[in-house]
Image (spheres, rainbow, N blue to C red):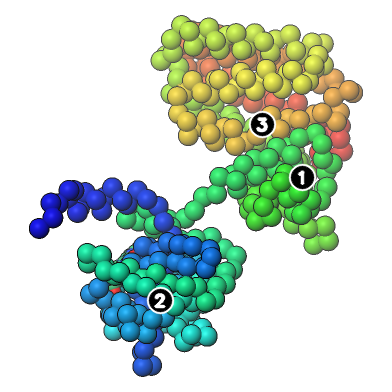
């Protein structure tokens, strides 16, 4: 007998870290359909197109494939977890309630699967409890969608790194100075400008529409949603709530270094508003962002900081003020004085005072942006 190198349960746990998609392997013999859920499916060669599947010898599906030498591989969509459960249960009719059609080789192919592949067995090998089928691919088709995934024994969804990056880029683009109100956001143009897959662009636009930064226009398609006073007020109210939460967590728990850094960032904002005007709007936005982000970061909660960053205050300020900055003379020096008063309250460890100053600052920020939106005619 061979020496057992690793406990099978340990191996199952360890190999569960290898994330995969989920398929349903199907076959048919004498008017009866067979199928099972399988993740042990691998692409093998392109020339000729081949894949391999590993199927437990105790299953009806394995016995039938061994005889008919044909099977279908249905790569499940993220919305088909119920089928993964259904085909993993030993039962008489796994196809009950399942939509499918027959492929040219006669095997059942599941409707709505992300991809459907018909295979002919070229060779098979026995390996422990399983039989490995090496098969040539006769036909293959795919549809749009996203895969169901399997990782550490549970089903999940695939998060595309590129989707997130493209979403951030388009979000920055919308909030930047480069686009006019109600400008169309053309998916194909964005896709070539950003060198991104069109599906990632649609993902970003759908998400931005849910967030209210983009909207669907019947004629123009996706457009930039103009920012009005309400959107601006809501954003600053949300910032205020986050900062009050951050204060509750941070005040009285900070080291001298952290307070010194907060003071340094506050002082950097002071000279940038003078005589009711922004001395240098670009530098003001950068210094203001550096101050507020550090302030929220002092709560040492990455979730809070993440929510804060997602407000895109920096971008919203740009959108609201940059077009009018040359004529805008409503930037009260009190805005930066608020920063100083907040830091002083932190230095004293006076939570109530800090809360009051944060609320005052929020109201003043709202007022400033409201005036800028009014100067622009009510929408920016
Ligand atoms: C996510 C997942 C992946 C699976 N992968 C495989 C596999 O690759 N090979 C296999 O033989 N069984 C696999 N199974 C188990 C079979 O689907 C299950 O044992 C099935 O019920 C056996 O079919 P039977 O009803 O004909 O016995 C998997 C089950 C799940 C839930």
Viewer-side residue, 74 vs 214: 74
> Quick check: 82 above or below 189?
below
CB of residue at label 1: within 8 Å of ligand 1?
A: no
Q: Which residue lies furthest to the bottom in this view?
A: 30
Which numbered marker is on residue 366? none
Q: Circle 1 sits in a helix, a strand or a loop, which is it?
A: helix
Return the residue at label 2: 121
Viewer-side residue, 338 vs 63: 63
Return the residue at label 1: 193
- Relative to residue 194, is residue 359 drawn left or right? left
Measuring from the top left, give residue 304's x and y in whole percent: 50, 32
Which numbered marker is on residue 313? 3
Viewer-side residue, 125 vs 206: 125
Image depth: mark 3 or mark 2 in front: 2
> Quick check: 5 above or below 241?
below
**Reading the chain from its start, which is encountered first: label 2 or label 1?**
2
**Which quadrant is home to the C terminus?**
top right
Measuring from the top left, give residue 92's x and y in whole percent: 29, 84
Quadrant observed for ligand 1 in the rendered image: bottom left
Q: Is residue 356 visible?
A: no
Q: Which residue is drawn at 86% across and 28% down?
A: 324
Q: Mark 2 near mark 1, Cβ–Cβ under 8 Å?
A: no
Q: Which residue is drawn at 55% across and 20% down?
A: 294
Residue count near mark 2 (Cα–Cα under 10 Å), binned few <14, some 14–19, many ≥20: many
Q: Circle 2 sits in a helix, a strand or a loop, which is it?
A: strand
Q: How far apart are marks 3 and 1 (CA)?
A: 25 Å
Image depth: mark 3 or mark 1 in front: 1
Measuring from the top left, give residue 182's x and y in whole percent: 82, 48
Q: Circle 3 sits in a helix, a strand or a loop, which is it?
A: helix
Residue count near mark 1 (Cα–Cα under 10 Å), binned few <14, some 14–19, many ≥20: few
């Amino acid at each position: 007998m061979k020496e057992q190198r690793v406990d099978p349960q340990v191996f199952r746990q360890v190999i569960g870290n290898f994330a995969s998609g989920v398929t349903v392997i199907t076959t048919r013999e004498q008017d009866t359909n067979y199928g099972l859920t399988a993740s042990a499916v691998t692409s093998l060669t392109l020339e000729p197109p081949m894949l391999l599947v590993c199927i437990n010898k105790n299953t009806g599906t394995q016995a039938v494939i061994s005889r008919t030498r044909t099977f279908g591989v249905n790569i499940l969509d993220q919305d088909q977890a119920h089928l993964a459960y259904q085909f993993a249960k030993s039962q008489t009719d796994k196809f009950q309630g399942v939509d499918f059609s027959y492929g040219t080789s006669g095997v059942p192919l599941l409707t709505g699967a992300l991809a459907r592949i018909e295979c002919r067995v070229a060779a098979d090998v026995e390996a422990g409890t399983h039989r490995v089928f090496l098969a040539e691919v006769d036909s293959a088709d795919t549809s749009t969608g996203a895969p169901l995934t399997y990782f550490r024994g549970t089903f999940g969804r695939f998060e595309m790194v590129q989707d997130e990056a493209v979403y951030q880029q388009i979000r920055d683009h919308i909030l930047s100075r480069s686009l006019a109100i109600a400008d169309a956001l053309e998916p194909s143009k964005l896709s070539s400008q950003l060198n991104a897959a069109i599906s990632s662009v649609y993902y970003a636009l759908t998400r931005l529409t849910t967030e209210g930064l983009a909207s669907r226009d019947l004629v123009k398609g996706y457009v930039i949603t103009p920012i009005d006073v309400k959107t601006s007020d809501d954003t600053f109210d949300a910032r205020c709530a986050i900062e009050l939460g951050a204060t509750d967590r941070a005040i009285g728990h900070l080291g001298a270094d952290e307070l010194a850094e907060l003071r340094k960032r506050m002082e950097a904002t002071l000279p940038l508003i003078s005589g009711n005007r922004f001395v240098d709007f670009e530098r003001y936005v950068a210094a203001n962002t550096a101050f507020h982000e550090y302030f929220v970061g002092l709560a040492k909660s990455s979730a809070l900081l993440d929510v804060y960053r997602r407000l895109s205050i920096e971008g919203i300020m740009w959108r609201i003020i940059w077009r009018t900055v040359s004529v805008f003379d409503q930037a009260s020096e009190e805005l930066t004085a608020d920063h100083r008063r907040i830091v002083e309250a932190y230095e004293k460890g006076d939570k109530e005072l800090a809360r009051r100053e944060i609320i005052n600052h929020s109201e003043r920020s709202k007022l400033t942006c409201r005036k800028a939106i009014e100067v622009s005619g009510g929408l920016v």
